[in-house]
Structure formats: C-alpha cells, structure tokens
Amino acid sequence: MHSRVQFQNVRTRPSDFRKTLAVLAILQPDVRAEARLSAALTGVHEVVLRASWDDLSEGLTAAAIEACLVDADHPDRSVASRRIADLRARFPDLSIVACVESEQAEGFFGLGGIGVDGVVFVGSRASRIRADVDNALSTARARRVEHGLRPRIPSPGPAAVAWAMNHAGQEISVERLARALGHSSRSLRDTLQDVGLPSPVKVLLWGRLLVAGARLGDDGRRVEDVAFSLGYSTSTSFARAMKLHTGLTPAEVSRKGGMEAVLRALVPEAHVRSRGGDTVGEDDSERHPPRPGGSAGKPSRMAKVATFAALLALGA
C-alpha cells in the first residue's frame, strides 16, 4: 500500500481555454491511479481531487460538477455500491464513472444497477480513459435530454433521441436503433411519422448533433476534435451539417449554450404534445401531414434503452 499524500485541487487555468471546461471530480485512494486519471483528463476537462466519499458529496453540493470518477472498491465493493447509489439518488443529472482495476467482466458486475454511467479501467491508455469518460458524459446528458423531451414530444421520440446520443460516433444504423426500441426498421419509421417526428435517419443525426453541442459548449472542445470524435471526415462537413439542421455554426452553438442551443433549434418550444398525443407547432400541418390510415396518438411498444449495456460492450 502506498501512503496517501495530500493533493491540492488540480484545476486548469481558465485563461488557457476559450470556454470553461466540464468539471470532473476524482475519488481514488491509490495515489498512482489518481495521478494517472488526473493526467489523462486534465486539459480536456477541469479536474478536482476529492479525498473521501463525504468530501465528494460536499463538493457536489457546493459546485457545478458534471461528472465524478470513483473507485468502485473503496473501501470495498459493498460500501462503494451504497455510496454510488446514494449519489445517483441525490444527483440524478450527475455522470458517475466507476474506476476498476480489472478489465474482466466480473469487475463490472452489478455496477449498472446502482446507477453507474460508465466504467474506466485505470490501467488504460490516456486516450481510452478520455473516450470512456466522454461516453459516460454522453449517457448522462442523453438521460437529461430524454427526461426533458418527455413532456414535449410523443413516444418513442425521447427514447430514440437518447439512444442516438448514447451511440453517437459509433457505427450505428436504423436497424440497431429500431431493435433497441422494440421495433422493426419499418415500424419505427411509421411510428415516428405517425406522431409527427422525423425519420429514424434524422433522429440518429439529432443525437450526433446534440452530443456535438455538448462537447462544443459544455466541454470547450475545438471544432476539429468534435468533428473527428463523432465520425465526420472533416470539420467542414461537420460545420455544414450543424448549420443545415440547426441554423447555427459551431461557434454560435458554443456561444449560445452548447447542447441546449442545439436542442432548442431541433425541437422548438412551440413543438409540443397536443391532447391527442400528436406533436403540433407552427405550420405543423404542412410539415407533417397525416398518413392515410395512420395511428397518431397511439403510444408504441418500446424497450427500455440499455445504456449501460452499450457501454459495457464498448469496454469489451
């Protein structure tokens, strides 16, 4: 065992960045693992170090911390699990990332059920640590978007958008989206059309643009980095897509609120449920004419989005 040394909070200097970075808290009693995680994430995120579970909880209450990385076995798995479950109950929007020492599947067992958004293997390369944290942030942000969309757009729209956000940057398809929601590709397309929502292809694009907005506005990333992380071949093609579908340039997205700005552009406030379940807005009858024989207003059967299972698949 290595003796614990006292660390000061490690913070990036705001003057070094155009935007304030997302703040991550790390609770890791192993000083070498703590240093490894901090080195991998500092500069991409603003990192603060916490010495105990109580210290972490107090910090979350007092500051705008978007994610925390916690040792899943500190002081043991049982205690850590209770602490993580308590954090999830108290801070529903928080992204919680469990740090494990083994990449074996048993190291992940039970973590999804207590509210973990992602898993980081402390022995991973820095690039992998950053990618895993990004995935966990996307999961928490998708959960927040899904919750915010439920009063505004009909099912299965919120869950579809959340799934698209969770899988942004991966090789995804309409078939995978449909299967996750308990549909065939055709039935998902018809169901979305029946309730006035865009095609599954466009929903997948929405997910990618929402994640891009978060990384631009909330994480302070460069346009080039965001574009490549989400599978665009060039920053120009990414900027073109953002402008075409939101009316905003990446710089405007960054200035106007990041993910929230993209969400407002994609789903305007006027775009809300009617009493029958349809989505209505200005000139909505022209944008979304009813389908002959359609079933507007009938909620579709869908499966719960298995976000943590997807993250585990990424870690395999």
Image: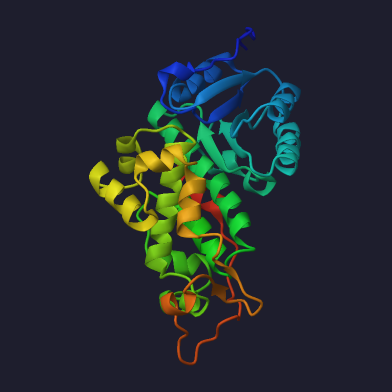
Residue 155 image-quadrant placement: bottom right
Q: Residue at x 57, y 67 (%)?
A: 153
Q: Residue 70, position in %: x, y?
A: 62, 29
Question: Please, is residue 286 above or below residue 223 in the view?
Answer: below
Farthest bottom residue in view: 293
Q: Residue 138, position in %: x, y?
A: 50, 45
Q: Residue at x 59, y 34 (%)?
A: 66
Q: Which is nearer the eye, 290 or 191?
A: 290
Q: Is residue 174 left or right of residue 68?
A: left
Q: Is residue 230 left or right of residue 197?
A: left
Quadrant, the N terminus: top right
Q: Which is nearer the eye, 27 or 312?
A: 27
Q: Report whether residue 130 is seen.
A: yes
Q: Residue 195, position in %: x, y?
A: 53, 76
Question: Please, is residue 67 above or below residue 233 in the view?
Answer: above
Q: Residue at x 57, y 32 (%)?
A: 100
Query: What is the count of numbered marks?
Result: 0
- Colouring rule applied to residues: rainbow
Residue 23 image-quadrant placement: top right
Q: Is residue 251 left or right of residue 50?
A: left
Q: Which is nearer the eye, 109 or 279?
A: 279
Q: Report whether residue 316 is seen.
A: no
Farthest front residue in view: 282
Q: Which is nearer the eye, 70 or 107?
A: 70
Question: Please, is residue 19 above or below residue 106 in the view?
Answer: above
Q: Residue 218, position in %: x, y?
A: 49, 36
Quadrant, the C terminus: top left
Question: Please, is residue 297 above or below residue 93 in the view?
Answer: below
